Amino acid sequence: MTAAIIAGPTLAADMDIPPPSAAKGISVQKGPLNCSRWTDDCVSCTRDGNGAPTVCSNTGFSCQPKSIRCLEP
């Protein structure tokens, strides 16, 4: 019990947590196969179900992309 008091509590703000990485094999331009709208919080893309090409927004040069997430299946 003394060791815990001497060492002090570890706060979540003191922990090194790596940022999430994008899924392997999925680019933001292609996106998940079962998704019609997705983003990586820098670029937003949409896909029409009629075979039209994927349309993506431009990204800001200082944006840090996160994991790709589906917004609309």
Image (tube, rainbow, N blue to C red):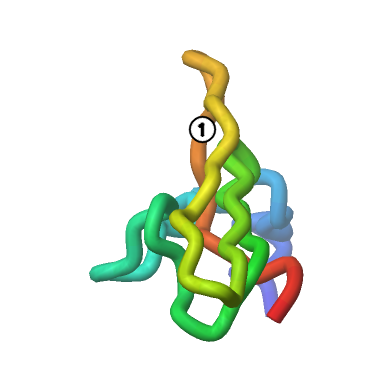
- Where 34 falls versus 28 (above or below)? below
Which residue is outermost to the top? 61
Read off the residue under disc 1: 64
Q: Residue at x 45, y 55 (%)?
A: 53
Question: Relative to the observer, which residue lies in front, 73 or 12?
Answer: 73
- 32 vs 3, left or right, is left
Q: Residue at x 40, y 51 (%)?
A: 29
- In the picture, residue 2 is in which quadrant? bottom right
- Where 9 falls versus 32 (above or below)? above
**Residue 17 showing in the rendered view:** no
- 27 vs 3, left or right, is left
- Where 32 falls versus 44 (above or below)? below
User: Residue 59 location, x and y as percent?
Assistant: 54, 26
User: Residue 71 location, x and y as percent?
Assistant: 73, 67
User: Residue 11 location, x and y as percent?
Assistant: 72, 54
- 55 vs 38, left or right, is left
Question: Relative to the observer, which residue lies in front, 28 or 51?
Answer: 51
Q: Which amino acid does label 1 sit on?
A: Gln
